[in-house]
């Protein structure tokens, strides 16, 4: 079994988009810490950016898949940046 150690441009773009999304969420949490209290302990967090329907669809599909697998998920919509 080999381990992939390089990522292609598409993977890099996807990673960058997710990092930006979670950075936005953390900025919201720092501005209003009560947001973090809404997330159930042990839940997988999925963020749906209102200004990026394609990424929101990817995140929603991942959340649905995790929920079907029995995972506790928390989905939150993010307003435009």
Image (cartoon, grey):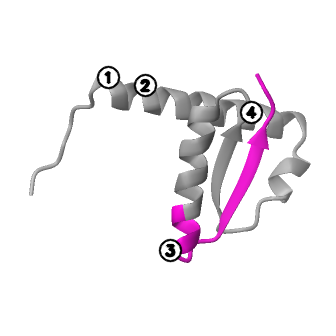
Q: Which mark is residue 76?
A: none
Q: Are marks 2 and 1 in contact (CB under 8 Å)?
A: yes
- Spatial CA span between label 2 and label 3: 27 Å
In the image, which is nearer the foreground, mark 4 or mark 1? 4
Residue 38, image quadrant: bottom right
- Spatial CA span between label 3 and label 1: 30 Å
Q: Position of residue 12 (x, y in %)?
A: 38, 27
- Spatial CA span between label 2 and label 1: 6 Å
Q: Position of residue 46 (x, y in %)?
A: 64, 51
- Residue at screen point 65% across, 54% down: 45
Which residues, given as a range, are shown in magenta? Answer: 65-81
- Spatial CA span between label 3 and label 4: 26 Å
- Residue at screen point 27% across, 31% down: 7
Q: Quadrant of the N terminus?
A: bottom left
Tell me the residue that label 1 is attached to. 9
Q: Tell me which numbered mark, 2 or 3, is placed earlier along the sequence.
A: 2
Q: Tell me which numbered mark, 4 or 1, is placed earlier along the sequence.
A: 1
Residue 79, image quadrant: top right
Q: Tell me which numbered mark, 3 or 1, is placed earlier along the sequence.
A: 1
Residue 81 vertical placement versus 60 (above, below): above
Total numbered labels: 4
Q: Quadrant of the C terminus?
A: top right
Tell me the residue that label 4 is attached to. 50
Q: Are marks 4 and 2 in contact (CB under 8 Å)?
A: no
Tell me the residue that label 3 is attached to. 69
Tell me the residue that label 2 is attached to. 13
For mark 3, give the secondary structure.
loop
Q: Position of residue 15 (x, y in %)?
A: 45, 32
Residue 28, image quadrant: top right
- Residue at screen point 81% across, 52% down: 36
């Amino acid at each position: 079994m080999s381990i992939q150690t390089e990522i292609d441009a598409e993977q890099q773009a996807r990673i960058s988009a997710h990092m930006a999304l979670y950075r936005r969420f953390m900025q919201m949490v720092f501005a209003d810490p009560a947001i973090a209290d809404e997330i159930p302990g042990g839940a997988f967090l999925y963020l749906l950016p209102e200004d990026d329907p394609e990424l929101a669809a990817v995140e929603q599909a991942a959340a649905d898949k995790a929920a079907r697998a029995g995972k506790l998920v928390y989905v939150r919509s993010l307003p435009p940046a």
